Amino acid sequence: MTAGPLANHAAIDDFAELDPQSIALLLDVDGTIIDIGPSPFEVHVPDELCRSLERLLARGGGALALVSGRPIRDLDKLFSPLILPAIGGHGAEMRVRGGEVISSAKSLPETLRRQLAKAATPDSGVVVEDKGYSFALHYRQVPQQEPRLRELIAQARAAFPGEAVEVLTGKAMFEVKRPGVSKGAAVGKLMTQAPFTGRMPVFIGDDVTDASVFAALPAMGGKGYSVGRHFEAVTGIFESPDDVREALRRLAG
């Protein structure tokens, strides 16, 4: 019988015993290392978290990356002045080091994005996020809007039958994006690049949008931790982003 994943405090202890010099640390952002805000544009990045990330980046020889649905340009604003290696847009773009961002997804037609933007009527409470290569609709404050958004997305897709797109669902969010783009595939590519190659990938995530990474970890000899929910074959489950921040602080030394 296989033992279940470690629960919160045991997970923190286990994580804190990792060796930053032998792992590649991969971190989802919203709901994992920062708390979910009222909207994607109303979140707080604690100073202590930035200090932990900066120290871990140095201790790990640069093998630390954010793995987020946010565009990399937005990650840079959130974590400024840090410029971290990153996977953005659920795998649509990547930066291994320095300032060069490599995009692997073609932009959605502007007319399709304009049609999706109609979801954010003045009193709807829906927040839209146009990333160019994808378009996200957030309904954190208005869960009753979910059926309307599903219908609007279906109508937009029907209006552009020649465009290859798929819908990614997350926490109170729909994202219309190009198919074949995923965090898991992007992590696989990242792990072939120095300084990540040859290390054990260690990933922390919280949402169904992170499932592709958890699924890819076993083939890479990796280790996964989740936040607030169970995923197949995770080592431990943290209760909250605050507990993840504590684990990162301890690992940073």
Image (cartoon, rainbow, N blue to C red):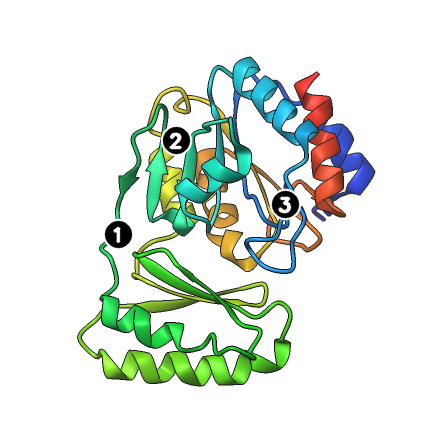
Marks 3 and 1 sit apart, C-alpha to C-alpha, by 25 Å
Q: Residues within 10 Å of mark 1 (few under 14, many from 20)?
A: some
Q: Check residue 191 in the rendering and tell me which mark sits there, or answer none.
A: 2
Determine the residue positioned at 25% across, 63% down: 108
- The location of residue 250, given as percent across then percent down, is 73, 23
Q: Which residue is mark 1?
A: 105
Image quarter for residue 112? bottom left
How packed is label 2: few (under 14 Cα within 10 Å), some, or many (20 or more)? some
Disc 2 is placed on an element classified as: loop
Total labels: the figure holds 3
Among numbered discs 2 and 3, the one appearing first in the sequence: 3
Q: Which mark is residue 4?
A: none
Residue for point 38% across, 63% down = 135
Of 197 and 120, the residue lying toward us: 120
* Mark 3, secondary structure of its residue: loop
Q: Select label 1 or label 2 by which is in front.
A: 1
- Give the alpha-carbon distance from disc 1 to disc 2, as whole Å: 19 Å
- Please say whether residue 52 is visible from this viewpoint: yes
Relative depth, front residue between 3 and 154: 154
For residue 32, the mark is 3
Mark found first going from the N terminus, 1 or 2 = 1
Q: Is residue 248 above or below residue 160?
A: above
- Category of crowding for the residue at label 3, using alpha-carbon neighbours closer than 10 angstroms: few (below 14), some (14–19), many (at least 20): many
Q: Amino acid at mark 3?
A: Thr
Please state which of the two labelled residues, at mark 2 or mark 3, is closer to the viewer: 3
Q: Which residue is drawn at the image coordinates 42% and 24% (left, top)?
A: 196
- Residue 151 is left or right of residue 247, and the answer is left
Residue type at mark 1 is Ala
Question: Whole-percent x and y of residue 127?
Answer: 51, 67
Residue 202 shows in the view? no
Image position of 45 with respect to 161: above or below: above
